[in-house]
Amino acid sequence: MSPEILAFSAVRSEPVLVRGVDLEPFLDIEGASPIPGGSGPAGWALAGASLARRLGLAPGTDVALVGSTVPRLEVVRITGLFDAAGPTADELLVPLDLARSLTGVGTGSFHSIRVRTQDSGTLLAFLASYGASVHVTGPGLPRADVNSDPPADDRLTNLLLRSGRGAIPRDYMTTGVAEATNSVRVVALGLGVFLGILVASGVHAVQARAFADRRRSVGILRAVGASGAWVRLRGLRETVPLALLAGAAGAGIGVAADRLLRPATSLVLFGHEIQGTADPWTLLAVVAALVAASAVSQLLLVGSALRERPTDALTDRAAAVEPRSLEVVLRG
């Protein structure tokens, strides 16, 4: 039987799943084996082989772990490595007491308890007689809800048991992380779309004001025989370089502002500081979006002018009705 507590943390700015376990039962039920070269079990912390390769960890390395749901900071020393099949090799194993400190889980409570048994019926009977309220699932074992209603959401799973070996079934932690990631992604994309609409509207408004002073030029070009495609192409040739210059200048100003305001713009979650990064591909995407908005705006403005007759475009129009004094109005 392997009771476990899961904590989400970060090591060297990389996400890491920290699993609090009772070491020997966990290694036995997982089929994992320690890699020789570590120190004794006192104050132990074992890094999976994949995690050690990914982050460059070795026995004797000190790492700082922050709490996943409570403001905690724990500094632990890697005492050894272990190897296992599957994603477990990319995790950090720590004692249960340390995992409780990182998660705030009370004494006697666990996120999951895995059990290996040859007789699942006896296990279910024991849980029912003991009065436990649990949801049981595992390879080759139909889902059973003991002294509890079937959960409406996978995140409501209170106790996870499994028989034999195999991948760990989807539990509430996995579902919670996936849904939280999707929620953040939806909010970020929604904010990005909203800002994109504002920027596109502003670009179109500025270009429409500038184009109003040159609208007669379209009529003149049409009058001398220029085709609509030629006029559109000329408009793009004038607009795209300016849009590229404006986008590059805006990206440069944004990077400079990020450097100057970095201490104030960092985000702290559960004691871990997340800083914004100037991703070159993101900056290029922003510049490309600005150029595309400028090009589409220019094509719309030129298209509206091309729909008019050249003679109408060449005709002077009063921008507004001349103001008339109150005396003139009263006299008729």
Image (cartoon, rainbow, N blue to C red):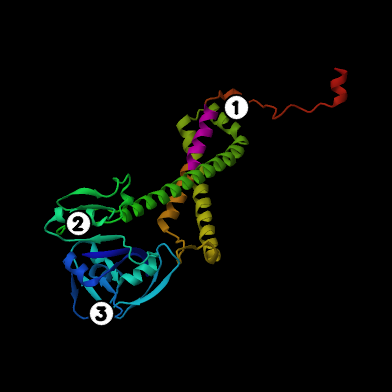
**Helix, strand or loop under label 3:** loop
Q: Residue at x 11, y 58 (%)?
A: 118
Left or right of residue 329, residue 218 in this image:
left
- Residue 13, can we see it? no
Sequence-wise, which precedes: disc 3 or disc 1? 3
Mark 3 or 2, closer to the camera: 2
Residue 297: x, y in percent? 51, 38
Secondary structure predominantly adopted by residues drawn in magenta: helix
Pointer 1: residues within 10 angstroms few (<14), some, or many (20+)? many
Pointer 3: residues within 10 angstroms few (<14), some, or many (20+)? few
Judged from this view, the residue extending furthest toward the top is 332
Judged from this view, the residue extending furthest toward the left is 118
**Helix, strand or loop under label 2:** helix
Residue 305: say if magenta: yes
Query: Which residue carries the number 1 mark?
Result: 313
Q: Residue at x 53, y 55 (%)?
A: 249
- Residue 209, can we see it? yes
Mark 3 or 1, closer to the camera: 3
Query: Which residue carries the number 2 mark?
Result: 126
Query: Mark 3 is on which residue type?
Result: Pro
**Helix, strand or loop under label 1:** helix
Q: Based on the displayed image, in which of its 4 quarters is residue 152 positioned? A: top left
